[in-house]
Amino acid sequence: MSDFTYELPPDQDFHKTLIEYVEHKGQNEIAELLKKCTMTFEKTSTFTEKIWNTFWCSITFSLPVSELANIEQSTHSLVKEFCGQLLPTKSGYLIEEINFVPQIVNQTVEQPADVEVVFEEQKSKIIEEINKAKFTIWIAVAWFTLDEIYDLLVQKAEEGIDVRIIVSKDEINKPKWEKYKDRLNIKGYPKFGAFNDNLMHNKFCVIDLKKVVHGSYNWSKRAGYNKETVEIVDDRTVAEEFAEQFKQLQIDINKK
């Protein structure tokens, strides 16, 4: 029999206590950063193999886009350490990872969407839009094999931009995943379904939570020989919808 409750503390209560604990530890700058965040727990059904019958969980901190550049590795490590110290032992969970993501903000004044559709030179247009990114680049593309775009994303990540990539987990993407995994945040979305042959078939990129690049075009050499479309939508409401889908894909990967 297990004495674990398998219940996590309420998000708001844990967040408030965490801020007080961080201040108690003398980490006032981190405390001020956490005050600008909202926080959510995410359970998984994966056993930790560290303590018998315990599961992994993760914590997501949402904060203003302008604050993402202040998340250094040392900050990330300390917050994870403090969260681990505060999580009740009886909960039956251990913290596998914490994530800092941009807050989805409400647009107070609706503006008509600015839409551009491209039928040729799609790769050049994607590169043009990525070059404009200032804060975040979230990519979910079924097949991504173009070194030119990967190298640009490495450059953007080195500039402090939050770059995240999700691709289908298969042999086509594997060589580039192996090549860039140490320099970019890349995750593979496994096949799923009754016969384990369904795919994450999205092809979109959310830039600065205000612009979406999407369409039929995979970011691959082969797609350059096909008849494909790329649509650029400059609209915060649309971008937020795609951003929510990206977040859900990340949650799905964590659960698999």
Image (tube, grey):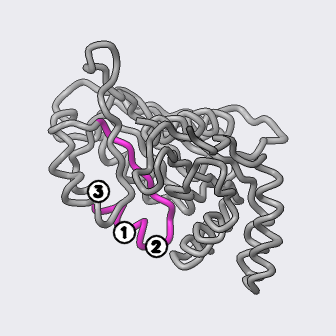
Residue 131 drawn at (x, y percent): 43, 59
The residue that mark 1 highlights is: 155
**Distance from label 3 to label 1 (Cα)?**
9 Å
Is tag 3's residue or tag 2's residue first in the polypeptide sequence?
Answer: 3
Foreground of the two, 133 or 167: 167
Residue that extends furthest to the front in the rendered view of this protein? 1
Residue 135 image position (x, y, % from top left): 57, 61
Residues packed near mark 1 inside 10 Å, few (<14), some (14 to 19) or many (20 plus) = some
The numbered disc on residue 159 is 2
Alpha-carbon span between mark 1 and mark 2:
6 Å
Residue shown at 62% from the left, 74% from the top: 70
The number of callouts visible is 3
Q: Which residue is mark 3?
A: 150
Inspect the magenta stretch and tell me whether residue 158 lies in it.
yes
Secondary structure, mark 2, is: loop
Give the farthest residue toward the top.
194
